[in-house]
Image (cartoon, coloured by chain):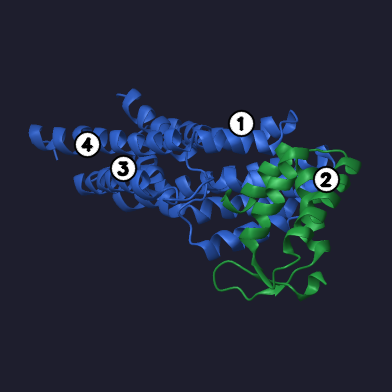
Amino acid sequence: MDYATPLGIIALAGLVHASFQLGVSMMTLLSGHSLSSKRSKQRTLGLVTCFFMGAVVMTMLVVSFIAYVVTQSFAGDLPVWLWTLSSSLLLGLGIVVWAFYYRPGRDGTALWLPRTAARFLSERTKSTRNEAEAFSLGLTSVLAELVFAIPPALAAALAITTLPVVWQLPGVLLYVVVASLGLGIVVVLTGSGRRISTIQRWRESHKRFLQFAAGGGLLVLGFFIYVTYVVAPVMSGNF
Amino acid sequence: MSELIDVVKRGKRTSEPFTRDKLHASIVASCRSVSSPEALAHHAADHVCDVVMLWTADKPEITSDDIRRQAGSALVTLHPEAAYVYQHYHIIM
């Protein structure tokens, strides 16, 4: 059994997920609001950590849910059309990310979100006072970006279901760990006393690179899945 | 005096009267968010409010973007990091 291919797909899908920025934006705002409300750095770190845990749990739930549905529906024998669907979503999303992920013509890191939704999330972030609210906000950050997170999560879930049962939980954990890297780095930076202006400046000056990397990663992943799981079985008559 | 000036908000939100206290609070919050000492935050906010009040003196109506620009450029000389947060707050997400 070839483990490297599914694990590689899971890791790359997780990396693409990690490059999405809504959670990082919300965490940056949360940390700024918390400090501006005269909360101690320790308390701010507590809120940010709970936000991180919420995002980790929801990411795990999303990918596990998709993997469960796929396993129950196809009993481990994935049809070619499902891989075709996954690669099409990844390729389409790659182009969408390149074109629309950041608002065209706007400075800063304003995202694709409708402005009313962005204002709502911003207000919710502002009024977050305790750890339970921060945890819920972390859950919400993943749900709010689901339209972008579903294609890589689907690709990872399909790859997870091709692994033997004992490898499936490590597969889910691999996806979650890699997908949470960006948020984890912000938690560490906040904990080490970096100013939010430093974090935001970095995000702003590298936003085009992150956008290119996310879109490029999606296209590479989509193309790889198409060749490996759609073209190869069809060419060999094994579908 | 300042309460007679209307602030036109972004989008379809209704306008509201300009209040020095609200501007003061947002400047203090921006300074605190970059871990600025409390005294420096209040000093910077007082200075920025004075500059903006002077600028609004002959205007019946201003936009929230005008305030952000004026306050941001007044703050940048005293506290560049806080000015960056103040000016970019609404475009972080």
Numbered circle sitting on residue A76: 3
**Chain of the residue that carries numbered disc 4 in the rendered image:** A
Q: Are marks 3 and 1 on the same chain?
A: yes
Discs 4 and 2 carry the same chain letter = no
Q: In front: mark 4 or mark 2?
A: 2
Closer to us: mark 3 or mark 1? 1
CA separation, marks 3 and 4? 14 Å
Q: Earlier in the sequence, mark 3 or mark 1?
A: 3
**The image quarter in which residue B14 lies:** bottom right
Q: Amino acid at mark 2?
A: Ala
Is A84 placed left or right of B39 in the picture? left
- Residue found at x 45% / y 45%: A63
* Quarter that holds the N terminus of chain A: top left
Chain A's colour is blue
The chain letter of the green chain reads B
Residue visible at 79% across and 67% down in the picture: B19
**Residue that mark 1 sits on:** A185
Proximity of marks 4 and 2: CB atoms separated by less than 8 Å? no
Q: Using the rendered image of the protein, determine whether residue B14 is visible from the camera's viewpoint.
A: yes
Give the letter of the chain under mark 2. B
Residue B44 - label: 2
Q: Are marks 4 and 1 on the same chain?
A: yes
Q: Nearer the viewer, residue A235 or B14?
A: B14
Residue A94 coordinates in the image, percent (x, y): 32, 43
Crowd class of label 1 (few under 14; some 14 to 19; many from 20; radius 10 Å): few
Q: Nearer the viewer, mark 2 or mark 3?
A: 2
Disc 1 from disc 2: Cα separation: 31 Å
User: Residue A127 at x, y = what percent?
Assistant: 73, 59
Q: Callout 3: helix, strand or loop?
A: loop
Q: Quadrant of the C terminus of chain A?
A: top left
Q: Pinpoint the chain carrying mark 3.
A: A
Residue bearing the label numbered 4:
A229
